[in-house]
Amino acid sequence: MNSDPTEKILGLPPRPVLGDAATGAILGAVALGFLTNDWKAALAGGAGGAILANQKQPLEFAVREYFRQKGLEVAFFYRAPRAVKVTFSYAPNAFWTVETVMPDNLDLSDDDRDDWLYGSLIVSALPKVLRLINNPRRNELNRSNRTTK
């Protein structure tokens, strides 16, 4: 379904590409080729690095990096075929688990499925959890409403 690494999956953002990490590999391969006085090796190394730069990050790596950028430490990452669950620390000795599950009616390729899980986690599931964490009073009200029903 999705051949372009920047194209959205059903309105959700895809996993980031390895681009930033591969830039050093490209430059290193080119430099090594020049140091060995073999321009063909420099070109081959640069081309190989460029191909790697367009590959998407593995799902766990992308999720851990996104959480790190948000200042959250991933304590546990669980991957199921159609779901992902992440337990993270948002303060000292304070943990929360967030989960996203792909609906049964979606039939996606493995790559698109990982993109959907990543996008759903960062766009939908995590923001809901962060709102609860940032508003503990609301969380307590919701919890007391659930126990009284």
Image: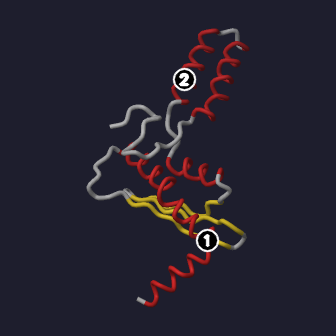
| Residue 45, percent from left and from top | 59, 20
Camera-nearest residue between 72 and 44: 72
Camera-nearest residue between 116 and 26: 116
Label 2 residue SS: helix
| Residue 87, percent from left and from top | 56, 66
How crowded is the residue under tag 2: few (<14 C-alpha within 10 Å), some, or many (20+)?
A: some
Question: Mark 2 to mark 1: distance in Å?
Answer: 48 Å
Tag shown at residue 135? 1
- Name the quadrant of the C terminus: bottom left
Tag shown at residue 31? none
Question: Which residue in the rendered view is the most extreme toward the bottom?
Answer: 148
**Residue at left 54%, top 66%?**
129
| Residue 108, percent from left and from top | 32, 46
| Residue 104, percent from left and from top | 28, 58
**40, above or below 78, in the image:** above
Question: Left or right: where does residue 66 sit relative to residue 124?
Answer: right
Q: Dividing the picture into quarters, in which one does residue 22 lie?
A: top right
Label located before the other in sequence (2 or 1): 2
Q: Dividing the picture into quarters, in which one does residue 24 lie?
A: top right
Q: Count the numbered circles shown.
A: 2
* Dot 1 amino acid type: Asn
Residue marked by disc 2: 48
**138, above or below 123, in the image:** below
